[in-house]
Image (spheres, grey):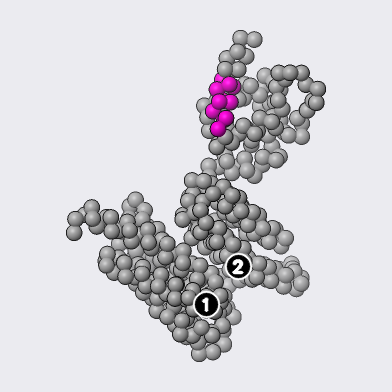
Amino acid sequence: MDPAKQNQIMGYFIEEAMEHLTTLEHGMLNLELMLSDNEMVNEVFRAAHSIKGGAAMLGITSVQNISHQLEDHFKTLKDNSNIQVDQKLQTLFLRCFDKLQELLELLRSPFGLTKDDADEIMADSDSLFTDLKVHLHNLVSGKPKEVAPVSSSKSTIEPITVGRTSGEERAMTLVFQSDIPVMLRDMLQLFKEPDRPTSRQNLQSICDRLYQAGDQFDLKQWCETIEVVKSVVGNPNNSFRMLAPIVIREVKLAQELVLAHRTQEIVVSSPLKEMMPPQELITMFQQEDDDISSVFGAVVEENRATEQWREFGDRIGWRSNGSWIRTASVKYSDTAPSGHMPAPLWLAAWDKSKDSNADEFREQLEAFMLKLKDC
């Protein structure tokens, strides 16, 4: 086949496979709901089947293998819709999904999916699918569920229940078992909508609710992860198609670790870190209500007026001993004469990367600085 034509077909396959990934993840995050909805089960089954078929046609053995085994297990779910879903089953499905997602992400990367990459990802896939098959069989046959977490090697992690009353523990479990899945479903629904500023604002509002859910129980690692998720969602350079699978998985896995009493293991994944905005913007978002230097910092680092800003601040008294003054120190005047320079807080409104007036303001600043030197 003509290489150009083959590349085109590969592009079509990857685009379609990424859409099927979203369908698969939605089903895995809502296993109980899926089992009560025949159409949803069929949709997830068809998604795995489609990925398997396309991978087989293109000779991508690793992707074909993972999607084929997922397809087989989804068939088991179709034939046994009355089974009682537990946390371990959902975790095992998500771990299998992670492997498929990682393979496809590498496949669409500039360097493609190499044999070494595929072998590394597939290294423990046989044992993982064996665990899933055995546990699924036990649930179908009605055998008692295992109490231990999926990863026994981490069972010695200090539980989050230390220092909590039984009432606090029950409240936290209730929130993370019932409220968090609802928020995840709301996020997933928003990701399916067109990428608009209002959609991103709504997603960030959900992040605020997720943060509050962990903050009330002093879950530091959970809160730090959600803060990163919020910054990633607010970055317009990240498309919804890129965000959806990574963000949903990140929050879901963090939720599982909370329920498994392993919050110490919650960390920000590499894919999520790669989608974070520049550090100076994160600092601005975190401190803009507290420190005027963070507001100016984003502009300072983004344009060539660094020294001019500092000199400007020194000359009009907005900097003291080499540091920008804090908001609390700003003096306002209701009777300022015409032409009086505005307070720093007013200027913060110009510090918006998407502000159509920002470039014009910077030009005015440069002109002002030139005149200031003649004074």
Hey, which residue is sitting farthest left in the picture? 1
- The secondary structure making up most of the magenta span is helix
Left or right: 208 in relation to 200: right
Image quadrant in which the C terminus is located: top right
| Gap in angstroms between the C-alphas marked 1 and 2 | 17 Å
CA neighbours of label 2 inside 10 A, class few (<14), some (14 to 19), many (20+): some
CA neighbours of label 1 inside 10 A, class few (<14), some (14 to 19), many (20+): few
Q: Residue at x 50, y 71 (%)?
A: 28
Q: Residue at x 78, y 21 (%)?
A: 336
Q: Is residue 363 magenta?
A: yes
Please say if 81 is above or below 297: below
Left or right: 344 in relation to 277: right
Write down the residue under mark 2. 181
Label 2, secondary structure: give it.
helix
Q: Amino acid at mark 2?
A: Pro
Label 1, secondary structure: give it.
loop
Magenta span of residues: 356-366
Residue 363 picture location, percent across and down: 55, 22
Answer yes or no: is residue 325 visible. yes
| Camera-nearest label, 1 or 2 | 1
Residue 171 picture location, percent across and down: 72, 70
Q: Residue at x 63, y 57 (%)?
A: 206
The tag earlier along the polypeptide, 1 or 2, is: 1
Write down the residue under mark 1. 37
Please say if 238 is above or below 30: above
Answer yes or no: is residue 234 visible. no
Image quadrant in which the N terminus is located: bottom left
How many numbered marks does the figure carry?
2
Q: Residue at x 53, y 69 (%)?
A: 29
Residue 322 picture location, percent across and down: 66, 27
